[in-house]
Image (cartoon, rainbow, N blue to C red):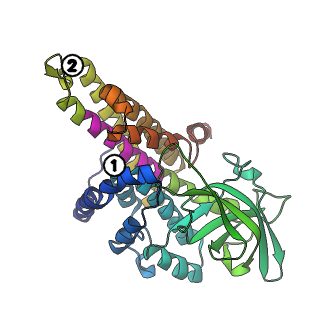
């Protein structure tokens, strides 16, 4: 199966390449060193329509496809993994609100998203990672309101100031739990009791905000419910296909960045009187790396195309996320090896790329979870 871009997609790709090279890449090292959130980049992305890329046109967005989303995230990821991570999670939240939100919620939050207000997705808890059904955060009904109490962890797009709203999954029925016992809420950051806790210090993606979320008697109106009471697990799982395709796209971009860095270094580095690119052993490394990167892209675009055509994409989304994330780590490791001792030093981008890639096999479902999804689909 081959994927050919339309003229409009080719134009989008050209714009993305220029934007990534001119606006995103120059900040990558600084964000890695300082850990600050790239707010100025978010504002520029909003002006270009990227923050509302997958928002329907009637709500102010570009109304573009998941295939276009893959193009956008991967190009941003080639320049800066931190910015790509923020972007991928933001587009996931857009997708969830578009799919499950009512008209009032769509007008408010999708409008905010297009304007550059970053959204977060709060599912994970200290004892509920891969096992989402074990979450403990509660939402207790009180007239026309619900009172939320609990603690979330590793929440992307929540920082000191960033993260204007979050999709929060909480228990409304402790007996049913994931089978109708969870409910999704759209909670504004300025809601009393919505407390951004510890900001995580991470191995990589330093410019991407990840924090703890503490809900202390956080009182929200029933109008904040996404879907219906009891739809929380459905909402959380309903966003997974799009979310996994987004992280697969990020992985493709990071893998390609590592490959490109290795190719350039191999051509420039001279040992024993010749560029190391002349060594057949390294040529074989590069061939393997390029083949895996190409395969990762094809898997990811296929999953995106299935989702665009409203076909079952669960297995393919997991295949794309599993293969692309493992590929990004493998290619980054080989690229660092090609750089030799210099690859271990912060003077070269591959050191950052190597660290940034490590999270890809963990978040939005570990590689082990993806293999479980794939095998279940095969054995049905």
Asked whether residue 180 appears in the rendered view, the answer is: yes
Residue placed at 73% from the left, 72% from the top? 193
Residue placed at 21% from the left, 23% from the top? 276
Q: Nearer the viewer, residue 17 or 58?
A: 17
Residue placed at 59% from the left, 74% from the top? 101
Residue placed at 68% from the left, 81% from the top? 223
On screen, 53 above or below 303?
Answer: below
What is the span of residues highlighted in magenta in the rendered image? 246-263
Asked whether residue 230 appears in the rendered view, the answer is: no
The spot of residue 288 in percent (x, y) is 32, 28
The spot of residue 373 in percent (x, y) is 59, 42
Q: Indicate whether residue 110 is drawn in magenta.
A: no
Q: Nearer the viewer, residue 118 or 246?
A: 118
**Could you say whether the residue bearing mark 2 is in a helix, strand or loop?**
loop
Disc number placed over residue 156 in the picture, else none: none
Q: Which residue is mark 2?
A: 279
Give the side of residue 269 with respect to residue 51, left or right. left
Q: Earlier in the sequence, mark 2 or mark 1?
A: 1
Q: Indicate whether residue 250 is drawn in magenta.
A: yes
**Could you say whether the residue bearing mark 1 is in a helix, strand or loop?**
helix
Q: CA distance from mark 2 to mark 1?
A: 26 Å
């Amino acid at each position: 199966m081959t994927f050919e871009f339309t003229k409009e997609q080719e134009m989008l790709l050209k714009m993305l390449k220029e934007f990534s090279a001119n606006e995103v890449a120059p900040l990558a090292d600084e964000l890695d060193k300082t850990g600050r959130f790239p707010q100025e980049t978010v504002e520029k992305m909003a002006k270009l329509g990227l923050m509302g890329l997958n928002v329907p046109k009637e709500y102010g967005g570009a109304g573009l496809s998941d295939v276009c989303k893959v193009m956008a995230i991967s190009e941003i990821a080639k320049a800066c993994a931190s910015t790509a991570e923020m972007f991928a999670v933001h587009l996931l939240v857009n997708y969830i609100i578009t799919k499950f939100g009512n008209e009032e919620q769509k007008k408010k939050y999708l409008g905010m998203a297009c304007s550059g207000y970053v959204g977060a997705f709060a599912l994970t808890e200290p004892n509920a990672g891969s096992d989402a059904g074990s979450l403990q955060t509660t939402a207790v009904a009180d007239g026309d309101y619900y009172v939320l109490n609990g603690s979330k962890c590793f929440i992307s797009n929540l920082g000191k100031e960033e993260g204007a709203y979050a999709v929060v999954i909480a228990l409304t029925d402790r007996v049913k739990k994931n089978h109708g016992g969870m409910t999704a809420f759209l909670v504004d950051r300025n809601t009393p009791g919505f407390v951004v806790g510890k900001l995580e210090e991470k191995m990589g993606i330093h410019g991407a905000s990840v924090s703890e979320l503490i809900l202390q008697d956080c009182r929200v109106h029933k109008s904040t419910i996404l879907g219906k009471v009891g739809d929380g697990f459905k909402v959380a799982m309903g966003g997974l296909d799009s979310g996994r395709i987004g992280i697969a796209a990020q992985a493709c971009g990071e893998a390609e960045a590592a490959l490109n860095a290795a190719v350039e270094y191999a051509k420039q580095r001279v040992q024993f009187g010749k560029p190391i690119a002349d060594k057949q052993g390294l040529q074989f490394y590069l061939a393997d790396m390029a083949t895996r990167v190409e395969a990762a892209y094809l898997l990811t675009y296929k999953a995106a195309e299935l989702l665009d055509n409203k076909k079952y994409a669960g297995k393919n989304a997991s295949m794309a996320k599993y293969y692309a994330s493992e590929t990004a780590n493998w290619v980054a490791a080989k690229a660092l090896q090609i750089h030799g001792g210099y690859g271990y030093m912060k003077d070269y981008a591959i050191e950052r790329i190597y660290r940034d890639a490590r999270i890809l096999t963990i978040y939005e479902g570990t590689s082990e979870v993806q293999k479980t999804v794939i095998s279940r689909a095969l054995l049905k």
